[in-house]
Image (cartoon, rainbow, N blue to C red):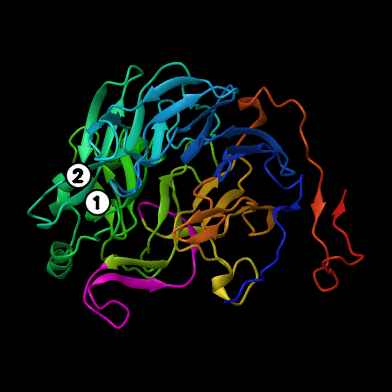
Amino acid sequence: MGYPQIYPTGITLYQPKKAFNGLTVFPSAKGALLIDMDGNEVQLWAGLSGFPNKILPGGYVLGSTGERDIKQGYQDELDLVQVDWNGNIVWRFDRTELIEDPDQPPRFMARQHHDYQREGSTTGYYAPGSQPLVHEGQTLILTHENLYNPLISDKKLLDDKFIEVDWDGHITWQWRASDHFDELGFNENQKNVLFRDPSIVPAGGGMGDWLHINSISTLGPNKWYDAGDERFNPDNIIWDSRNANIVAITSRKTGEIVWRIGPNFKNQTFNGLIGQHHFHMIPDGLPGAGNFLAFDNGGWAGYGPINGTSPHGKNVERRDFSRVLEIDPITLDIKWQYTAKEAGYTDLTRFFSPYISSAQRLPNGNTLITEGADGRLIEVTPEHETVWEYINPYYEAFNGKTLNMTYRAYRVPYSWVPQVTDRQELAINPPDISTYRVGGVTKWLIN
């Protein structure tokens, strides 16, 4: 569909009595940005990139001091750091791998990408009764590794590796995705496609980004494990592969994949996932606890038979709209969903982000959604009413285009950031768009 050239940015809608009021952090073109409910910028950690950014209790923020040159590597962060309110680094990890780039001095690098979790919090977002550690603890990190695996392809692979590091930066546990190729459920046709071209990235050293895992988190305490289902051991790790349409759980104890849907999953309720992001279990203490929550992007993903939209067997699955899904992990029934239809539109593309994006369950039962491709953050109620909307006003160049895309946003309670003492919770009612004109007499109504 077509989009207007001119549209408002910042806060466009806010109903304080229906929202979960707090502070929201997200990576912007300016750096890690913290805003209040009225969109006021209460803190900026300039230059701190975020893949993603997360707030820790006490006003600490996690992020990276920079990214590796894409000509030498794809989506690699130089490090993972924790900074205080004033931007001082109080913890750093950058010791995954020694990188020898031709244009730079040899140095160690974290190669962190897409996700990480600090001990004490399963997902990195607020849940009653749990919070990430600030001055100690383990950190689970999603990283990259270059390797060859002839079972997958004769091309160089950009593999995904999970590592856990202690406070002093020592790696205490690791898991490599390519070691479990036979557990992923690819059929012979898909294996043939992967062997020929495991999603070779044109830049980034020409490596095959064959899985493109974009989220990892621990399951944490849950009712399924309490009922005796060992697959949902609280220490197990849930993750998703954007390129292969796979979501899975890895046993921390054995390394085996103990639960999986995809890459060839279809059922009558949600007919598979395409290019999904932020697949995780809703933590204990929140509405829907124990169910899975994900931003099911749609767009293009998956390996399989050549068809009219995929002459080479890559990106064979297509869907031109997105969904936020809450799924029962046992029955795989949809317990709640959000699409443009639930929002009241007939055109499903009105809610569509074919890449990045996320969803966070809030304590009041609402869901904070990052529709990342267009930099749109919304909070919606269980009845699908939008009670808060923010459009990222900061644009940056990306692949020759100027975009305000937003990877992932998190809402935290005020108590996590004691430095913010002036709460701004003024209702914002949007104008009547049938009469509002730029430069006209109709104005925003702020109560």
Looking at the rendered structure, the kind of residue marked 2 is: Asn
- Residue 165: x and y in percent read 31, 25
User: For mark 1, what is the residue?
Assistant: 205
In this view, 268 is above or below 259 = below
User: For mark 2, what is the residue?
Assistant: 146
328 part of magenta stretch: yes
187 part of magenta stretch: no
Residue range corresponding to the magenta coloring: 303-330
Name the side, left or right, on which 380 lies relative to 422: left
Looking at this view, name the residue that lies furthest to the left: 150
Looking at the rendered structure, the kind of residue marked 1 is: Gly
Image quarter where the N terminus lies is bottom right
Which residue is located at x 82 percent, y 43 percent?
A: 426
Looking at this view, name the residue that lies furthest to the front: 103
In this view, 148 is above or below 109 = below
As helix, strand or loop, the secondary structure at mark 2 comes to strand
Give residue 344's quadrant in the image: bottom right
Are discs 2 and 1 less than 8 Å apart at CB?
yes
As helix, strand or loop, the secondary structure at mark 1 comes to helix
